[in-house]
Amino acid sequence: GAGVSQTPSNKVTEKGKYVELRCDPISGHTALYWYRQSLGQGPEFLIYFQGTGAADDSGLPNDRFFAVRPEGSVSTLKIQRTERGDSAVYLCASSLTGGGDTDTQYFGPGTRLTVL
Amino acid sequence: GEDVEQSLFLSVREGDSSVINCTYTDSSSTYLYWYKQEPGAGLQLLTYIFSNMDMKQDQRLTVLLNKKDKHLSLRIADTQTGDSAIYFCAESPRRGSQGNLIFGKGTKLSVKP
């Protein structure tokens, strides 16, 4: 596709449930990033993939959060035992990662997660 | 530590210039970015500046960078109602610009007709 796409656009779940959020990066982009944006805040980094491997997962808040990118394209962010504090917009971004201005990150529309 | 700060609100009249300011802390940042977020939408890249530049102009947008003071600004000329949005400043603290971006909390720009 032309841009980064994310599904679903909205997800409502109950406390304690498991959720998966999907990201399709721009075709050809090798780097993929997940961020979380709480109400009234800027995006906060969660994890960064270079190809299939997680190059930096230092932003994941705890071990309930996990992300995969098995074929180096689509990525899934997985949240176990969801808590009300996990409610936020989860943003995905991708970049070409060729150095210089090709490192610019392009963002998807986000998935709004609401934990009841 | 890494922290990006912005004023939270700015209100201007249509046709005036808007100036949104940002301060950052990591002098190793190679690129600095401005993103725009409209209600219910994702982040749209507006412009960016490489750290060895002082100024970058792109149509109605002018970015000024003062590395000594770690101060970044975005000027929007002839501001229109369609410019109403939240503007985020972001730095890329790692060499080579790979890895996470550090965002400010955003400046909400309101344009009055």
Image: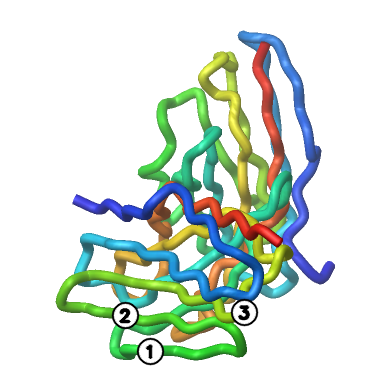
Residue ranking furthest to the right: A1
Location of the N terminus of chain A (image quadrant) = bottom right
For label 3, the residue is: B78
Determine whether the residue tagged by mark 1 lies in a helix, strand or loop. strand
Choose between B64 and B47: the one closer to the eye: B64
User: What subunit carries mark 2?
Assistant: B
Circle number at residue A83 = none
- What amino acid is found at the position of numbered circle 3 in the picture? Asp
- First in sequence: mark 3 or mark 2? 2
- Tag count in the figure? 3
- Indicate the quadrant where residue B19 lies: bottom left
Report, in whole angstroms, how far the alpha carbon at label 2 lies from the one at label 1. 6 Å
Residue under the point 62% across and 52% down: A92
| Picture coordinates of residue A52, whole percent (x, y) | 57, 57
Task: Check if mark 2's residue and mark 1's residue have beta carbons within 8 Å.
Answer: yes
Left or right: residue A16 versus residue B11 is right
